Image (cartoon, rainbow, N blue to C red):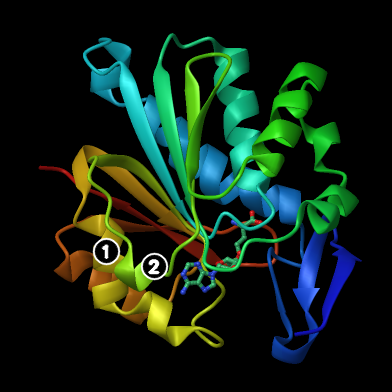
Amino acid sequence: MRRNIITTSDGSKTIQLVDWNEQYHSVHGALAEAQHVFLKNGLQYRLQAEDIITKDKRHLHIAEMGLGTGLNLLLTYDFLTRERLDLEVTYTGIDKFPISYEEQSQLDYEKYADSLNSISFSAMCKQTWNTKAMYSGGFSLEKKQIDLSVYIDNEPIDLIYFDAFGPRVQPELWTEESLNVLVSKMSKNAVFVTYCAKGVVRRSLQNLGLRVERLPGPPGKREMLRGVKEN
Ligand SMILES: C[S@@+](CC[C@H](N)C(=O)[O-])C[C@H]1O[C@@H](n2cnc3c(N)ncnc32)[C@H](O)[C@@H]1O
């Protein structure tokens, strides 16, 4: 499939799949979308929960469906290290078709993090698939090259970044069955976030037992979805 690197409205870059007319991020701002959907409404929201504040929970497992360019990973790692929360984090990145390091390095994402964190990010991008590695600040990255439909996670998940290509091009990834591959592993208070706001996805998440909110979306999108596993 033909691939281009394009610049989105906020000046950050992303990859475009020409034949699908689909991008790895929103054309209205790749960085803005990642910060709004996944950082602010996902990670930062999860970190405000009672169990984190009272320090009952010392380990967080984040799973990202569609690790792609690693932008969400970079922003998450940078945020966590700057906050010094004394929290151990395992980040599982799932992707069936990983991008090459050569393509990734053309996106210039390093400038969105502290310089030391950018050096770690570069190592994360070079990390071999299907391995787990430790980085500073108690952060482990597990990279899984696998189709979502056959993925099995043995560890409960506290935060899901669901960042598949849209239902227009990959409807099979947005069915109740596909969503349940990750949702079924959510722990109490776990949070699921996605940029997609389609009614059918919202109803599937509700059927799977989540309390679902429609939140204002990132630039160029009216809404996004957040689901919370309340018990
Ligand atoms: C929207 S992009 C991910 C964007 C990414 N989160 C980022 O920040 O760059 C969707 C990703 O899903 C991956 N993907 C497509 N089909 C998949 C499947 N069946 N199972 C797992 N990953 C898949 C693609 O390779 C692509 O990297």
- Drawn side of residue 107 relative to residue 65, left or right: right
Q: Residue at x 57, y 54 (%)?
A: 67
- Percent position (x, y) of residue 198? 42, 77
Q: Please state which of residues 102 and 86 is positioned toward the viewer in this rendering.
A: 102
Residue 162 disc label: none
Q: Residue at x 42, y 53 (%)?
A: 193
Q: Residue at x 41, y 76 (%)?
A: 173
Determine whether the beta carbon of the residue marked 2 sits less than 8 angstroms from the nearest atom of ligand 1: yes
Mark 2, residues whose alpha carbon is within 10 Å: few (<14), some, or many (≥20)? some
Q: Which residue is mark 1?
A: 181
Tell me the element at label 2. helix
Mark 2 residue type: Leu
- Percent position (x, y) of residue 168? 54, 87
Q: Which residue is mark 2?
A: 148
Q: Are marks 2 and 1 in contact (CB under 8 Å)?
A: yes
Determine whether the beta carbon of the residue marked 1 sits less than 8 angstroms from the nearest atom of ligand 1: no
Residue 15 quadrant: bottom right
- Percent position (x, y) of residue 133? 52, 30
Q: Please state which of residues 210 and 167 is positioned toward the viewer in this rendering.
A: 167
- Drawn side of residue 126 relative to residue 84, left or right: right
